[in-house]
Amino acid sequence: MGGSGILAFVPIVLMIVLFYFLLIRPQQKRQKEVQNMQSSLAKGDKIITIGGLHGIVEAIEDGTVILKCGNSKLTFDRNAVRTVLEKGNAVSNPVVAETTSDDTDVVEDNK
């Protein structure tokens, strides 16, 4: 009779172990990756917020991130960063050298 009592708890223990490996452990792993990503933010990183806003990190304070989006600067909570697209010190406004040359002739083919 004592053996049947223990056998009744085996399915419950197996379900708890199954839930741990299929649900709890992967969620903890994802949370740790997100926390590492958010703590390793640096100036110049191209990111996407949880609201879908694309921007470049302009400055980082304790719990906030200042993003440059076009000509405006927006302040977000550090937890609002969903994805880092590019790491590194990207220039927020790269200057594109305009080359104009009078030496080139444009030939149009009007048939």
Image (cartoon, rainbow, N blue to C red):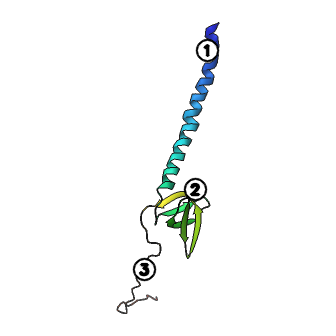
Kind of residue sitting beneath label 1: Ile
Q: Residues within 10 Å of mark 2 (few under 14, many from 20)?
A: some
Kind of residue sitting beneath label 2: Asn
Kind of residue sitting beneath label 3: Val
Marker disc for residue 49: none
| First in sequence: mark 2 vs mark 3 | 2
Which residue was labeled with disc 1? 6
What secondary structure is found at the residue carrying circle 2? Answer: helix
- Outermost residue to the bottom: 102
Q: Are marks 3 and 1 in contact (CB under 8 Å)?
A: no
Q: How many marks?
A: 3
Marker disc for residue 79: 2
Q: Position of residue 98 (x, y in %)?
A: 41, 84
Q: Position of residue 26 (x, y in %)?
A: 54, 40
- Between disc 2 and disc 3, the foreground one is 2
Instruction: Quote the CA–CA distance across marks 3 and 1.
Output: 74 Å
* Residue at 58% from the left image edge and 66% from the top image edge: 75
- Between disc 2 and disc 1, the foreground one is 2
Q: Are marks 2 and 3 in contact (CB under 8 Å)?
A: no
What secondary structure is found at the residue carrying circle 1? Answer: helix
| First in sequence: mark 2 vs mark 1 | 1
Marker disc for residue 96: 3
